[in-house]
Image: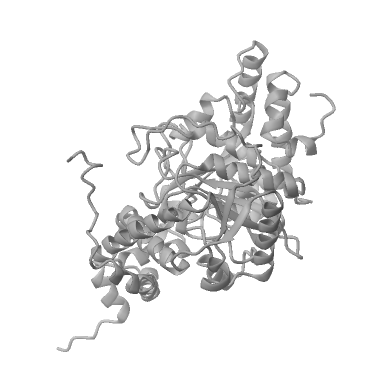
Amino acid sequence: MTNKPASESHRLAAEIGLEQPTPAVLEQLPLAAATARKHKSALKAFALVLADEPAVIFSAEENGVK
Amino acid sequence: MKGCEMKDLAYLSIADAAPLLRDKKLSPVEYTNALISRIEKHDQSFNAFLRFTPEIAVKDAQRAEKEIMRGDWRGPFHGVPYGLKDIVDYADLPTTAHSRVLIDNVAKTDAFVTQRLRDGGAVFMGKLSTYEFALGGPCFDLPWPPARNPWNRDYFCGGSSSGSGAATAAGFLPAAIGTDTGGSVRNPATMCGVVGMKPTYGLVSRRGVVPLAFSLDHVGPLTRGVKDNAMMLDLIAGHDSRDPGSVKTEPVGFTTGIDAGIKGMRIGVLRHFYNRDMVADPEVAAGIESAVKVLEDLGAVVREISTYPLTEYLGCNRIILTSEAYAVHEAWIRDKPQDYGQRTRQRLLTGAFMKAADYINANRVRRKLSQSFNALFADVDVIVTSSAMDLPCRIDDDEQVEYTYGRQSRAPFNVTGGPALAVPVGYSKSGLPLGMQLVGKPFTEALLYRAAYAYERATDWGSTHPALD
């Protein structure tokens, strides 16, 4: 018995946890992944500027901690 | 008001209508019926309304008339017709978000803004078309058709508050509510030649509005004139303890000082957004340059300014937007993907490929961009830049619709959170509207209205209307 290699679309579906994607969804996944890469690449260089910045993802003041 | 023709009522401003209504010189019922007739005659060509509700409108108008006749005038929106983008709740009516997914979603209560308009005695005319879930684009695979541009029905009218832009431009309504996560009030305002405000984040409650991206969503008004826009923001702004993003601010009075002029106002022109980072259509760029010259002639002190490249702001917006949107839609995408239009599903699936690290880093970048952008206001009071880079395109040209989707400079101000106002600056050779944005630091809406009102009075673009026949 040989394993049939998964298509790129099936691989992407597995990556995002879609267990039974419809054919229409499968067809759209490569473009969705490419668009996500494009958006991320727009920020890649800029993120390096932030390497030494404190990460602010929880505001103490706004959440009444101080 | 006797002898007033339907065309006059169709393009009556709220600023002019309010005293007529208050002084019993204009009947809310006559006003409403005139607009109902106009909508019945023309909207089959434009699809601005997803759910037209003349029966509610007549009842609201009759109630307003009775109240005004007995001396109980509630304020400038009493007896004034308006519409809601169909992601905003109106009690006992479906809020569909223009989607099969929510086709049976009947709102139990009013949204905060709906309640404000109801309390102000405004006349509800119906629910307006949107892009599906305020995200997709003009689509023909949804239960309702997309809105079309009143200046040329073969062209799209921008979005996602498409019906809000189309209805105000077409003279169906003097005012409409839209929402804006990456530019969705200001895009249809620009494409339809009307005025659209994205207020400061938190100034207008989002309670009762279908979320797209929690940290970028804003609710704002679309009107034909600047003063009307300020009047509507006066009515809908305010703290709401049931929207965690809502801010506690004192009422400002957005029309106060609106006619004070702009002599000495420091205006920064952010040109690199539209002449370097992206190159706008020459007619769009020329429209903005003409507007800057008018502002200078009115006494503003104009200088060029710069910030991070537009693409950084757009990337930041898209990573946060698609991540948050996927968080809203993940279960539905998994369970009933077929209920979405093809274009919306495509955009939503992008969010599935954003990782936690991407979202966190985008938020770190957002903080940096916001701090840097707001620092510009040490040297300027108002910033002028582009809104759309391109003219409206044909609604059936999928390739062009996709091409123009990302070519905009509105999303940066969803990232920074400050107010941004789209204002018409004329028309292309082909007769399609051109626009610019006026941008301020947080909570300076009144200043933007003052600048825009001075410009509007000097140019009078708003007196030209589309021929619907």
Q: Which quadrant does the C terminus of chain A fall into?
A: top left
In this rendered view, identify the residue nearer to me: B73 or B275. Answer: B275
Q: Is residue B78 above or below residue B244?
A: above
Query: Residue B437 appears in which quarter of the rendering?
Result: bottom right
Which percent across, then down, holds residue B76?
62, 26
**Exactly how many numbered labels are in the figure?**
0
Q: Is residue B11 left or right of residue B178?
A: right
Q: Which quadrant does the N terminus of chain A fall into?
A: bottom left
The residue under the point 61% across, 41% down is B450
The residue under the point 70% across, 29% down is B17
Q: Give the colour scheme shown.
A: one colour
Q: Is residue B108 visible?
A: yes
Which percent across, then down, holds residue B315?
40, 66
For this orientation, the residue located farthest to the right is B3
Q: Is residue A24 left or right of residue B29?
A: left
In this rendered view, identify the residue nearer to me: B67 or B47. Answer: B67
For this orientation, the residue located farthest to the left is A1
Q: Is residue B266 left or right of residue B182?
A: right
The residue under the point 57% across, 45% down is B448
Which percent across, then down, holds residue B365?
33, 62
For this orientation, the residue located farthest to the bottom is A2
Q: Is residue B145 visible?
A: no
In this rendered view, identify the residue nearer to me: B341 or B77. Answer: B77
Which percent across, then down, holds residue B275?
58, 71
Q: Is residue B245 above or below residue B280?
A: above
